[in-house]
Amino acid sequence: MTLLPIHIAIAGIWGILILASLIVFTLTRLQPTADHSELVQRTTSWWAMIAVFTAAFLLSRTFSIVIFALVSFLAFKEYLSMIPTRRADRRVLFFAYLAIPVQYYWVSSEWYGMFAVFIPVYMFLFLPFVMLLSQQTEGFLKAVGTLNWGLMLCVFSISHAAFLLVLPVDGPGSVGGTAASGAGLLLFLVFLTQFNDVAQYTWGKLFGRHKIVPQVSPKKTWEGFLGGMLTTTVLAVLVAPLVTPFDALHAGIAGAMIAGAGFIGDVTVSAVKRDLGVKDTGALIPGHGGIMDRIDSLTFTAPLFFHFTRYLYT
Amino acid sequence: MTRALQLLFFVFVRVVVTFVLGLNVRRRELLPEDGPAILVANHNSHLDTLVMMSLLPLSKLSSLRPVAAADYFLKTRAMAWFSLNILRIIAIDRSRATRREDPLAACHEALNKGEILILFPEGSRGAPEEMTALKKGIAHLAEKNPQVPVIPVFTHGLGKSLPKGSFLLVPFFCDIFVGEPIAWPGSRDAFMTTLGARFAALSTEKDFAPWE
């Protein structure tokens, strides 16, 4: 096996994880009385998540696509379990679930045209049709609206991350065409999105003063947002040559875009949770909450980063 | 042979329960490690029995005995074979006319052997995600076995995934709330009141998403 730049990048992520674990371990030793259980749980969950993604990256492209389909399924299931639904719509929900394997099939078959329209056009028109067959009009608009929105957020958006894997990218720095460069772009997107979450959280914890949208998410501050954006942009410029075809300017723009969109995705899911009166979207990932709590930023960064890359580099 | 089939079936059940449904179990530590014990749960779906049996480790499978109605679960030959050999139910005769001895005799015997019973005191699945009145059989059972802990378990979501009368499994995350064991309070009425109160408390622990 030849050592590709992407392997170095993955090794770097494990390096950061080990470093973070050491810091958490030292913290629990230095302050034995304080409650660090959530921090410890969070770190442990990161090990599991990064292990799954490393395995997916190294094993095969198809396996990676299946993992993203699974993430979409879990997120969509969490969403449907959380929102008000109607008894009469069980069959409609079933069809909505079936859209997941179909959408990811378009990804693996590299059919961009169908991938881009299947959910926003065909499912958008098909689901209300199945729904009206039960002839229950009370709550119809709310039911079909919330269902389509969830499908867009959990399946359509997230599938853009997976489509990066099959995107035929060219331009300076691309590693001989498709496979390697696609994986590099996906790694760049997921890593920076998750890193930005942590960076904004950390900056906010240390210097957070001025709240941005206190009624939606009281812990989000300008200090956290701007500090996170700066860190993410700098990091994007530094790691771009390793895994993407971006020049420094494009890398910087991509980093800032990921930071901004990630923030908006995060507070959007916060708004949904507040509307529904729940704290976490679920309990699937110890210390983090549900899977939606973990991928909320990615639902906004994935499609934007995808089209940025597709417009400039294909 | 049937033991191997049973094990195979429940491994499959666990995979489906974990990935297609997904359980969020509160206070798993209150579940009994060993029998004799009685688990009582609300009843919404055919999934209830399978999910209750998935809550305990596979090594405990041989001591798990769901208590179920003979008239329903032994209706056809195939169903009777499946109920008795794979689910390993204790069949209860619900019709009063044919009752000569204590209808719960088989349950007492199982508890004496140290097995863990699974009961649904609502008797029937009824309308999904709605609790109906609890039947008193459980109080008779607890009275005869006062040292055996009775553990209430409230489930939400299984009736949404597979309600009575449907064959289409729609995935939803399911919430499971395990309650503190109920010690025998001295009388059947007091027992039923305690059990009802426990279920009422467990079922209001979380605001569930409306399903109408």
Image: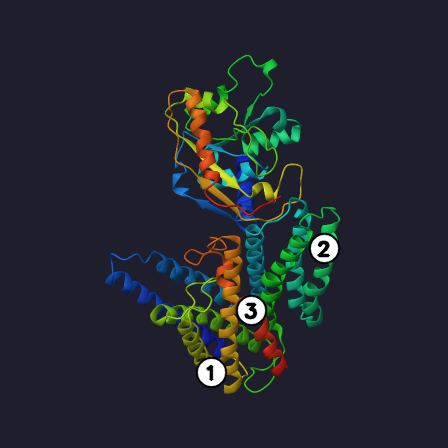
Q: CA distance from mark 2 to mark 3?
A: 25 Å
Q: Would you identify the image quadrant in which residue A157 lies? A: bottom right
Query: Residue at left 41%, top 23%?
Result: B190
Relative height, residue B180 to residue B110 (above, below) = below
Closest to the observer, B60 or A190: A190
Viewer can see residue A2:
no
Query: Residue at left 71%, top 46%?
Result: A136
**Residue B83, x across and y down, in percent:** 58, 31
- For residue A300, the mark is 3
Q: Chain letter for mark 1, please.
A: A
Type of amino acid at the residue the image marks with label 1: Val
Q: Left or right? Give the position of B60 relative to B161.
A: left
Marks 1 and 3, the one that precedes in the sequence: 1
What secondary structure is marked by label 3? helix
**Residue A30, x across and y down, in percent:** 24, 63
Residue to which mark 1 is pinned:
A237
Residue to which mark 2 is pinned:
A128
Q: Chain letter for mark 2, please.
A: A
Viewer can see residue A113:
yes
Residue contact between numbered discs 1 and 3, judged by CB atoms under 8 Å: no
Relative height, residue B171 to residue B85 (above, below) = below
What secondary structure is marked by label 2? helix
Q: Nearer the observer, disc 2 or disc 1?
A: 2
**Residue B184, x across and y down, in percent:** 38, 25
